[in-house]
Image: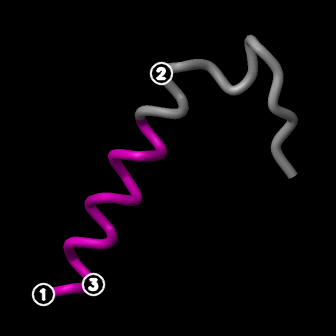
């Protein structure tokens, strides 16, 4: 469970997770 506040997760962490999920999704679709 992620605790979401104004400082957690950081903007960088959100972006990194989004990038990883996007890469995973594109691999799954190939």
In the picture shown, does residue 17 fall above or below 23?
A: above
The answer to whether the residue labelled 2 contacts the one labelled 1, judged by CB atoms less than 8 Å apart, is no
In the picture shown, does residue 12 fall above or below 23?
A: above
Quick one: label 2, few (<14), some, or many (20+) residues within 10 Å? few
The answer to whether the residue labelled 3 contacts the one labelled 1, judged by CB atoms less than 8 Å apart, is yes
Q: Read off the magenta span.
A: 16-30
The answer to whether the residue labelled 2 contacts the one labelled 3, judged by CB atoms less than 8 Å apart, is no
Q: Is residue 6 left or right of residue 25?
A: right
Quadrant where the image shows the C terminus:
bottom left
Q: Secondary structure at mark 3?
A: helix
In the picture shown, does residue 1 fall above or below 10?
A: below
Dominant SS of magenta comes to helix
From the image, tell me which residue sits under label 1.
30
What residue do we see at 87% from left, 52% from top? 1
Q: Secondary structure at mark 1?
A: loop
Q: CA distance from mark 2 to mark 1?
A: 28 Å
What residue do we see at 27% from left, 84% from top? 28
What residue do we see at 20% from left, 86% from top? 29
Corner quadrant of residue 7: top right
From the image, tell me which residue sits under label 2.
12
From the image, tell me which residue sits under label 3.
28
Q: Earlier in the sequence, mark 2 or mark 1?
A: 2
Q: CA distance from mark 2 to mark 3?
A: 24 Å
């Amino acid at each position: 469970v992620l605790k979401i506040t104004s400082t957690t997760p950081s903007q960088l962490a959100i972006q990194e997770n989004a990038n990883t999920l996007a890469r995973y999704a594109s691999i799954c679709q190939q």
